[in-house]
């Protein structure tokens, strides 16, 4: 008997985690932490699984909504091997250490005694159970050599994979977070299509159509033009970016635009966690399938600049481009701290290139009227937004049309829809049913076991 159980608390992009049972073998896929929920509810619901053994875990990629609770579940299973790519291991360790710091400061500020859920020391300890596996090479997940697994590159961020699990001729494929198109660094997904019985499919962009005239190249040129216009007018540009993935992709895209002479030569200011993450991207620049093989962003002359003192807020000077984290201008991060002053100058531009949660400070900036007073840090008075704002689409997730095309090519017996809000999952369900009437489409109810 093979079964699937979602351990997320709701059907959403939150604390992603799933359990696959294959006869008496139990495989855990991802163990994330919810980015918007505080306390114990931010963890997956592990209560129904910790009474029994787990043979192995798979970590699809380093983002915290997939990796953030791995130390918590590994505490229950100190012997459990956790399979991932080598670059995911490096990125996830850095993100988890940062997560300890964030949780520790929340413990003090919000008086949340349960934080941090784990310590720096524990991360060192549990990462000894992390096993590096290369995409394209089959390996076993259990000590009886019955369940096989192969990783396939997912095109989402460095190290991201989809996992094919095989048992007695049955094939289950988990996409993880996927992008089928090339980004500036990471090449599009290279996924299997043959003889898959069950496809576990992410649905992040199921509710967001992409304009038919969209191309990444024209979107990049539009960004270059906006930066040029702003600098010509004597302003500065801020692009709030997630430290991992988005920073490296965006900076490389700006570098390409400079090479094509669509953007003037100037360096981009990064800080804090982004420096750490960029160094990891650089470390793997020759050993993974990617564009700009061997190019090290930190060593590219004149491309990046860093604050002279660690953690210091950079000075806002005219004609600069600040590529700072965090991506949603979350309180206490560099983009937020600089942002309070930055948005008051009518010559400046805030360019959004990724997802902004509706509750986030960046969404407040983007959604405000010119001259409207907005509060982007709850500890400070509101400030007037006088700068320009513009949004661009450079998502690391596949547009819904490409997800449908992939589902249609695979044509599995069953598709399980995960990693999407309700609207996204509904859209995907309806359209898959139209295109693949023979395929069973399953929206898993959290904590309910489904036979597959
Ligand atoms: Zn992700
Ligand atoms: Zn995700």
Image (spheres, rainbow, N blue to C red):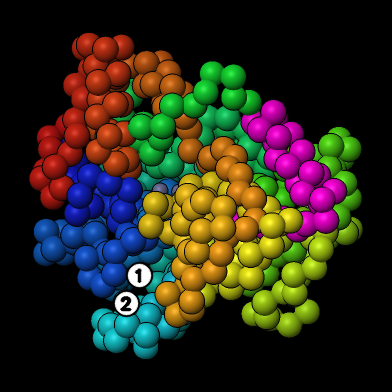
Q: Which residues are magenta?
A: 216-241
The magenta stretch spans residue 240: yes
In the rendered structure, the answer to whether residue 262 lies left or right of residue 41 reads right
In the rendered structure, the answer to whether residue 382 lies left or right of residue 279 reads left
How packed is label 1: few (under 14 Cα within 10 Å), some, or many (20 or more)? many
Residue depicted at x 54% and y 18%: 212
The mark found on residue 331 in the picture is: none
Q: How far across and down, in percent of the image, does residue 276 sit?
A: 64, 68
Closer-to-camera residue (393/370): 370
Q: Residue furthest toward the front?
A: 371
Which residue is labeled 2 in the image? 117
Query: Which secondary structure dominates the residues rendered in magenta?
Result: helix
Q: How far across and down, in percent of the image, does residue 156 sit?
A: 52, 42
Closer-to-camera residue (227/148): 227
Q: Please say if 109 is above or below 95.
A: below
Q: Please say if 82 is above or below 445.
A: below
- Residue 20 found in image quarter: top left
Residue 139 showing in the rendered view: yes
Q: How far across and down, in percent of the image, does residue 132 sit?
A: 51, 55
Which residue is labeled 1 in the image? 71
**N-term mark: 2 or 1:** 1
Q: Quick one: SS at disc 1?
A: helix
Quarter of the N terminus within the rendering? top left
In the rendered structure, the answer to whether residue 149 lies left or right of residue 418 reads right
Residue depicted at x 28% and y 83%: 112
User: Do the residues under discs 2 and 1 have CB atoms within 8 angstroms?
Assistant: yes
């Amino acid at each position: 008997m093979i079964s699937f159980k979602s351990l997320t608390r709701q059907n959403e992009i939150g604390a992603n985690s799933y359990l696959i049972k294959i006869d008496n073998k139990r495989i855990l896929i991802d163990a994330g932490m919810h980015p918007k929920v505080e306390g114990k509810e931010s963890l997956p619901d592990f209560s129904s699984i910790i009474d029994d053994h787990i043979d192995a875990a798979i970590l699809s990629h380093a983002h915290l909504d997939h990796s953030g609770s791995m130390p918590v579940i590994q505490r229950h299973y100190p012997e459990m091997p956790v399979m991932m790519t080598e670059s995911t291991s490096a990125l996830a360790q850095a993100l988890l250490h940062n997560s300890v710091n964030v949780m520790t400061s929340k413990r003090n500020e919000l008086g949340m005694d349960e934080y941090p859920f784990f310590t720096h020391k524990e991360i060192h300890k549990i990462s000894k159970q992390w096993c590096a596996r290369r995409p394209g090479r089959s390996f076993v997940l259990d000590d009886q050599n019955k369940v096989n697994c192969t990783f396939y590159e997912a095109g989402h961020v460095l190290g991201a994979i989809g996992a094919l699990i095989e048992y007695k001729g049955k094939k289950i494929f988990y996409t993880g977070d996927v992008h089928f198109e090339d980004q500036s660094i990471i090449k599009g997904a290279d996924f299997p299509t043959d003889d898959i019985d069950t496809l576990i499919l992410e649905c992040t962009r199921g509710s967001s159509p992409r304009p038919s005239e969209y191309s990444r190249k024209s979107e990049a040129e539009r960004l270059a033009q906006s930066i040029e216009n702003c600098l010509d007018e004597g302003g500065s540009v801020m692009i709030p970016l997630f430290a991992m993935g988005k920073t490296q992709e965006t900076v490389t895209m700006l570098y390409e635009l400079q090479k094509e002479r669509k953007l003037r030569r100037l360096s981009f200011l990064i800080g804090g966690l982004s420096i750490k993450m960029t160094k990891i991207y650089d470390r793997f620049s020759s050993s993974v399938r990617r564009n700009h093989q061997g190019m090290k962003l930190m060593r590219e002359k004149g491309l990046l600049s860093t604050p002279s003192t660690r953690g210091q807020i950079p000075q806002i000077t005219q004609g600069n481009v600040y590529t700072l984290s965090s991506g949603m201008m979350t309180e206490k991060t560099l983009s937020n701290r600089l942002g309070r002053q930055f948005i008051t100058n009518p010559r400046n531009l805030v360019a959004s290139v990724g997802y902004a949660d509706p509750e986030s400070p960046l969404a407040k900036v983007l959604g405000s009227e010119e001259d409207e007073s907005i509060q982007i840090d709850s500890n400070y008075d509101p400030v007037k937004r006088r700068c320009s704002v513009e949004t661009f689409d450079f998502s690391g997730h596949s547009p819904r049309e490409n997800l449908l095309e992939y589902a249609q090519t695979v044509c599995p017996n069953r598709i399980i829809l995960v990693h999407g809000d309700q609207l996204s999952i509904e859209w995907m369900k309806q359209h898959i049913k139209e295109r693949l009437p023979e395929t069973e489409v399953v929206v898993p109810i959290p904590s309910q076991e489904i036979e597959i």
